[in-house]
Image (cartoon, rainbow, N blue to C red):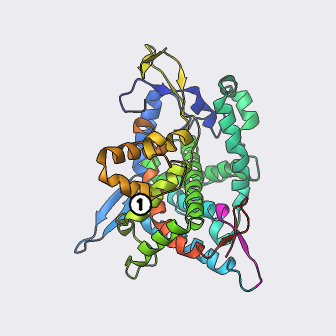
Amino acid sequence: MSSARSPYTRADWYAGQKFEADHDNLFSNTDEKTHVRRRAQMMIGVSLLVLQNQGSNKSQYSGKEIDNLEAIIDKHLLELIDLIKWNYLSVGSELKPMDLARKSAFFTMDVITELAFGHSWGCLPRDEDVGSWFESNEKMLPRGIMFSSIPWLAKVFLIPAIGRLFLPSETEAVGSGRLIKVLKDAVDKRFATEDYDQKSDIMGSFIRHGITSKQEAVTEASLAIVAGSDTTATTIRTTLLYIITNPLVYKKLQYEIDCTDIGIAPVISDAIAKRLPYLQAVIKEGARILPPASGLLSKKTPPQGDTINGIFVPGGIDIGQCAWGLQRSKAVYGEDAMMFRPERWLEAEKYPERLEMMERSLGLVWGHGKYSCPGKAIAWLEFNKVYFQVSDLLMICKPQNNFTNEYSC
């Protein structure tokens, strides 16, 4: 349904994913021609390029149009580690609980905002939810999913006058509205400079490749920041939780970490991380066990209809997916699909057809074909580093109880 030449199109479900009532972003746009054009403009700015260092067998990973992408991620990862070490290490009877969910979100937000604008939001250095963004986001996202998932409500939501009542406004002092205001101010400053299209960040790339109006720049930057922070943080916090609450998994991962020489670098390189089989299995299993985006992502059947598994489906019918069901399918992942068990990926290497089926199914977490996530490579770059660096640190953290995200170190 999502392949490049598929006659399927996006259903109205996507229309509920707007950040502003009068403006569609790449994700909310349901017009195929506009989507293809805009996607081509945005992909370059968030794609990765491998640069081979002269006289060395090491590779440097950077954005095609973003300087020092890997170094930026390393910088904020070190800020995360320092934050935990200095603020949340309990000494004696002094208990210092840490909300792991929040800290992982601070990390991904600071990474994506620096990649987008050349400077970060500043959540990690300040150790706070700057502008109450995350608090607001936790209220906004479920509301957006509800609007999208109820067909008649999605159609009502498409009416701008009604959409304005529920969507963020730049007049808001905190949360999503504040983000839009900050983005508009940043875009105004960028366009006011003579070299506004020459900056080596995501915004500069957008402008160079045809997103030349201020409103379009704000709209797509909003999507990049929301998608690049929330979904990635969800996967990070989930995977870390499974690592530190599964002693067998932790011991195997820690053994691989202990046996890995990363040289004098303070953070493991992406190139080295990709060569660690158990780490890669942990990353895949973490994304599988709790998909970061669980919306329907509905597609509309072509006018002539389609036959699926021997059943004819008329044209104009919305077909959605259950991400949790797909990623916990026993037919794909085995009878223990409900368990967090990274070993399944290593065992499947002996059976190429099975491994291919598992990887293709897992790939749906980030979409596929013409609807795949543009920032997947950047997210995977963060995964390769954060589990390696933080797992050892968080193993000394004990869950306070089974019902919260809080840990004491």
Q: Quadrant of the C terminus?
A: bottom right
Q: Identify the residue shown where x is 55% and y is 59%.
A: 239
Q: Position of residue 339 (x, y in %)?
A: 54, 53
Q: Which residues are magenta?
A: 93-102
Q: Is residue 151 left or right of residue 136?
A: left
Q: Position of residue 240 (x, y in %)?
A: 57, 63
Q: Identify the residue shown where x is 72% and y is 52%.
A: 175
Q: Which residue is mark 1?
A: 280
Q: Inspect this view and state whether residue 199 appears.
A: no
Q: Identify the residue shown where x is 47% and y is 26%.
A: 9
**Is 301 or 219 nearer to us in this picture?**
301
Residue 29 on the magenta span: no
Residue 96 on the magenta span: yes
Tally of numbered discs: 1
**Is 88 or 408 nearer to us in this picture?**
408
Q: Is residue 246 left or right of residue 92?
A: left
Q: Quadrant of the N terminus?
A: top left
Residue placed furthest toward the front: 335
